[in-house]
Image (spheres, helix red, strand yellow):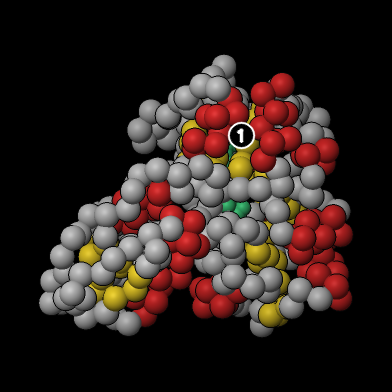
Amino acid sequence: MTLHLSNSPQDIAKAAELLQQGELVSFATETVYGLGGNARDDQAVAGIFEAKGRPRFNPLIVHFPDRQAAAQEVLFSPMALELAEAFWPGPLTLVLPRREDSRISLLCSAGLDTLAVRVPAPETARTLLRMADCPVAAPSANRAGKISPTRAEHVMDELSRRIAAVLDDGACTIGVESTVVSLADERPSLLRPGGLAREELENLLGAPLELPVADSPVASPGMLRSHYAPQAILRLNATSVGAEEAYLAFGSEPEDKGKACFNLSPAGDLREAAANLFAALRELDRSGISMIAVAPIPDTGLGQAINDRLQRAAAPRVT
Ligand code: TXA
Ligand code: MG
């Protein structure tokens, strides 16, 4: 049975103990819930891939309580330091060269000579990471290709019996995964748009971020075209709704709302929309509707991460 732990000090200590014992524990970050395991323990890391049904070529993000702990495992260039100082703890993942003396399981890097590292913001997560006293590998706590979880109940729905515990810290405040930036090459590149807006990164860097070559398997192995997929088929940029469709609205709603309607943000606020996105897709899916029409979402700020996830959710399914 999977334990449903609260965020009390005793329960956080219990979760830390389970991680030390090589068990898998899901915990909340400000972006989505992660499926955590001791990153130094090959068996624990292999267990993460298994519980998720994730292909082994897709590397994992390793989580730390602070930058100093991350610096034991990867090499920080001056630019990496600058980004970490500006945005950690927060929704930014940095892909950096692995240190030769790093004892992180090679499975986390999936054959690459880099490691993705991140310091999540919530106090509960950082207390857990400090108490576990080991780097924690954690992909989003969903089955591969499915919608990422933003509440403990979502994790329970999909992974119960596959993991030891879920540490419930409430709903994730940001709701889309971290922005992934690679600093492994000469120029910084954006591997995944996410919870930290691209504009904020570019303002600090004073230059545009490179975009990886589309679908290059090496640059960003996890960016599969079909991902975050609900059962229902999605129709994007829809300004009207068919009688058989549900509507995922943003801002104002059309008069005819189809079979069901969920508004990501009646006020047209992209942060609010990001926080609601995955829960909304789950809810519309649960209602058994087979087609979801999705309102156009502006492609600025967090809108880029929202549109990225929607395009993957709408893509032809790989089974
Ligand atoms: O917000 C998040 O980032 C959440 C929370 C739990 O931290 N985690 C998450 O992990 O979204 P995951 O495994 O679902 O996505 C990690 C992404 C994938 O696209 C993966 O391919 C990429 O990061 N990645 C990981 N390590 C990499 C590496 N060494 N080089 C390039 N891409 C890497
Ligand atoms: Mg994921």
In the image, residue 164 above or below residue 236:
below
The residue lying at 66 percent from left, 48 percent from top is: 90
The structure residue drawn at horizontal position 29% and vertical position 76%, both measured from the top left corner, is 261
Quadrant of the snapshot with the C terminus: bottom left
Dot 1 beta carbon under 8 Å from ligand 1: yes
Q: Position of residue 9 (x, y in %)?
A: 85, 73
Quadrant in the picture for residue 291: bottom left
Tell me the crowding category of disc 1: few under 14, some 14 to 19, or many 20 or more residues within 10 angstroms, Cα based.
many
Which residue carries the number 1 mark?
A: 95
Tell me the kind of residue under disc 1: Val
Image quadrant assignment for residue 44: bottom right
Percent x, y of residue 128: 80, 61
Left of 128 or right of it: where is 243? Answer: left
What secondary structure is found at the residue carrying circle 1? strand
Residue 96 location, x and y as percent? 65, 30
Q: Nearer the viewer, residue 72 or 183?
A: 183
- 177 up-or-down from 3: above or below: above
Asked whether, in this view, residue 17 is left or right of residue 216, the answer is right
